[in-house]
Image: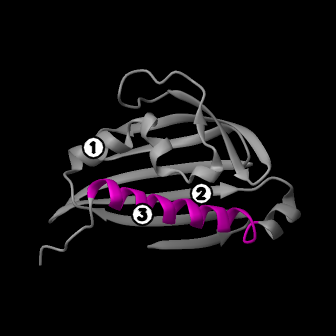
Amino acid sequence: MLKFSDHSGIHSIKAFQKLPISKEEAWQFLSDPRNLNKIVPPEMDFRITSETEGDEIFPGQIITYTVKPVPGFRSNWVTEITQVDPERYFIDEQRHGPYAMWHHEHWVKEIPGGTAMFDHVSYKLPLGILGNWLEPLVARKRLRLIFEYRFQKLEEIFGPFKDPS
């Protein structure tokens, strides 16, 4: 499930997916930056360029990447993990990259039959009015592709969720 909204130039996307695994398994997979390559579309040519210390993220961790946000354009991206509540949520924020602003909340919650995963991304494009005009044509379209690909890959990795009721 995806939902987009806009408020004064700040755009957001909310995504929700149920996984047939424990909250601990979901957290272990989602909080390991090395797994990002498994759930990002190959055409984005996503590459982590920094060392990832240990198996799990931590507050203050800086992660650097290169990515093709749109075909033919490669960008460096730097994010900081600003908050972590283990097995509950973590937040990453862009420090440098293709967006004027990026704030991404990743939540996991145990539910009957597995785990619910919820994302809330707030973002702003550069270029002012032109960025706002391009948002539905470029950023929204790309984010929809990314989240739909991620849904599919997580289902391939962990299997489909079966409602226990």
Mark 2 or mark 3, whichever is nearer to me? 3
Label 2, secondary structure: give it.
Answer: strand
Label 3 with label 1: CB-CB less than 8 Å: no
Query: Could you tell me residue 68's position as x and y percent?
Result: 70, 47
Please identify the quadrant where the C terminus is shown: bottom left
Crowding at dot 3, Cα within 10 Å, few <14 / some 14-19 / many 20+, comes out as: few
Query: Could you tell me residue 26's position as x and y percent?
Result: 28, 48
When asked about the image quadrant of residue 77, the answer is top right
When asked about the image quadrant of residue 30, the answer is top left
Residue 144 belongs to the span the image colors magenta: yes
- Which residues are the magenta region? 135-158
Residue 16 belongs to the span the image colors magenta: no
Label 3, secondary structure: give it.
Answer: helix
Q: Amino acid at mark 3?
A: Gln
Mark 3 → mark 1, Cα distance in angstroms: 22 Å
Work out whether residue 131 or residue 73 is closer to the camera in this orientation and state it.
73
Please identify the quadrant where the N terminus is shown: bottom left
Mark 2 → mark 1, Cα distance in angstroms: 22 Å
Residue behind mark 3: 152
